[in-house]
Structure formats: C-alpha cells, structure tokens
Amino acid sequence: MSLPLLDFVLANYKNFNARATRDALLAYWRHIERGGKMFWALAGAMSSAQLGITLAPAIRAGLIHGLSVTGANLEESLFRLVAHSHYRDFPEYRYFTKDDDTRILEARMRRVTDTSIPEDEAFRAVEEHILPMWRGATERGERRFWHEFFYDLVQELPLAKHEGSPDECWLLAAAQRRLPIVVPGYEDSTFGNILAGYVKTGEVSPSIARSGVEYMAAFYDQYAALSQGEGVGFFQIGGGIAGDFPICVVPSTKYDLQRESKPWAYFCQISDSTTSYGSYSGATPNEKITWDKLTRDTPMFVIESDATIVAPLILRALIECAEHPEEANRRIAAATR
C-alpha cells in the first residue's frame, strides 16, 4: 500500500524544522484519531499560492472543521476558480525594476510575489455576481456575515464559469460542508474596498455586512460546539488578525462572558517570521500561555519555514492517514517505537 508522503516524513524528518513538522503532523493525526477537531487560520496569500490543491481535499476528508481567514484569502480562493487560466506567473520577480511592475499594472494584473491576479477576469467578473446580492440584501434590510455572501456565490456559479478545478477550491469545499468560518478584518480586502465604494455612492447599505464583533459573538457558541469531546486544535499559517482573532475566544469566554471554556487542544504555527520585538507572527507559543489562550499542557509546535512548502506536505500526509488509518498507524508505530 502506497503512503508516499507519510513514509517520506517518517524516514527523513528527524531534526530541526523537519522534526517539528513530523511531530506536528503525528500529533494532529492522533488528535483526529481520538475524535478531536481542528481549526485552521490562514494569513498570507495562501489562496493565490494555490493551497486549495491540498486544503480542499483535506476539508472533504474531515480533517478540518473550521477556518479563520483574511478577506483576501477568502476572495482569492474564488478568483482561482473563475480566472485560473488568466493568471500570469513571474518567476523572475526578484529582478524586476519599477518599470517592469509598471508594465504589469498597465496590463491590468495585480502581482502577488511570483504570480498575479487578473483585474478583469477575477475582480470585475466576481463583482458582476456579488453586486446583485449586495443590492438585494440592501433592499430586504438583510444583514449577513461576510463569508455567507461568498458561500452562496461559489455554490451558485454555473460550471461554465469554472476555469480552475472545483476540486481545488477550498472555499467551495468549506461551503458545501457549511464549515464555521470567521473573516476578521474583511474590510482590508479588495471586495471590502469594492463594498465601501458602493456604500459611498449610496448603492448599497453598509449594514448588510455584519461586523467583526458580531463574528466573535457568534464564534463563542461555535467554539463551544467544536470543543466538545476531545477538543479542538488550532493550526495557524502566518500571524496577524487571522490567527489572533479566533484564538482569543478562549480567554474572552472566560473573562468577558464569565463562563468555563475548554482550552485549545493543540497548537501549531507555520511561519517564517522570527521572534522579534512585539511581533505577533514571531511570538512563541509560550507567550500565549500568559494570555490564557494556551496552557502548559497544550501540545505546541512551531515550524519556522515557508508554509507553501510545509502545509501541502502535512495535508497530503494527513489525507493518506485518513484514507488508510490502520496502515498509517502501523507505519507510525514502527517508525517511532
């Protein structure tokens, strides 16, 4: 039986960040095996980097049970679905001049490191579909969470509009499973800006999009449900608001609601940000103990590496474990005894 990624990690990942990757993977799998759940936080440009290739199958395999994402990651998963063939890659971006990037601007492309999002085929094409939803919500006096507009849109798009593979769209996989999701700070995204423009011109009401405070108010109950039984772990890519917003639900429940709350059952962060002065991205997990987000007993892992390399490897190995649990457990036991 072939479990190539799991075998590779078990055979080769012995020390340093490789060991942290292996240990985080095995602890993740053990938590799932015991009936636990896992919550993911996505910062950075993970959707533009096509993390959906492995993230979407992992969602469908029952390995991910909730998400916190930036507004950019939310919309860019949809962009990859509707405009994939119009993206352009720039592998030589490190050597670009200002004139090179100006030419990219004039071609109506928006560069994200070594790839680019097409203005017309992505932003404006999606705008045509979401604007009627916003106008309808305004007319009905309806208020919705930011992701709910995108959950409906990604499922209503006709197949003829798919340029990318729907099997690789994590937004579609999450919408189909109705995963709980929070999108803190969604105003800081292209479609947050687009909504603001329509609010300024009076075409839509700002009240149609529920606030970040309302996201947290709803997340209290979502977290309580997720943390039943073996509890829910926290798997974080990058730092910033995508990570800090949801992890605060535990201390907020305890100190602001004066209710008991089960602590996070696992913590892993993939980041290339080193520990520095006041950096959330570079903060070590121990610091979170002082904020009552984690405890001294929480399994904690920090993988200081590029998430575009590490996360797909972990996800693919986890999918192998989910597909062949008995064989995976046998190989893990043999490798770690």
Image: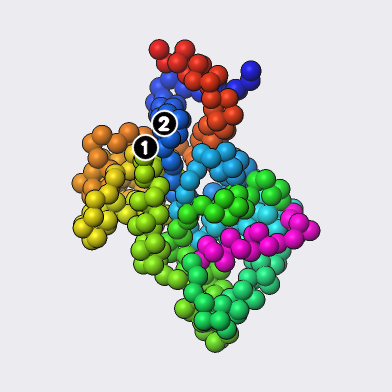
Q: How many residues crowd around disc 1 within 10 Å: few (fewer than 14), some, or many (20 or more)? A: some
Residue 236 in the image: state x and y as whole percent.
42, 45
Q: Please, what is the three-letter code of the amino acid marked with disc 2?
A: Arg
Q: Please, what is the three-letter code of the amino acid marked with disc 1?
A: Glu
> Closer to the N terminus: mark 2 or mark 1?
2
Residue 17 in the image: state x and y as whole percent.
42, 29
Residue 38 appears left or right of 137: left
Q: How many residues crowd around disc 2 within 10 Å: few (fewer than 14), some, or many (20 or more)? A: few
Observer able to see residue 219: yes
Segment colored magenta:
146-163
Which of the image's four quarters has the N terminus? top right
Residue drawn 49% across the image and 74% down it:
143
Q: Which mark is residue 34?
A: 2
Q: Which mark is residue 230?
A: 1
Taking the magenta stretch, the answer to whether it contains residue 83 is no
Residue drawn 49% across the image and 20% down it:
329
Residue 139 in the image: state x and y as whole percent.
57, 84
Residue drawn 68% across the image and 54% down it:
81
Residue 172 appears left or right of 27: right
Residue drawn 45% across the image and 16% down it:
333
| Nearest to the observer: residue 275 or residue 142 | 142
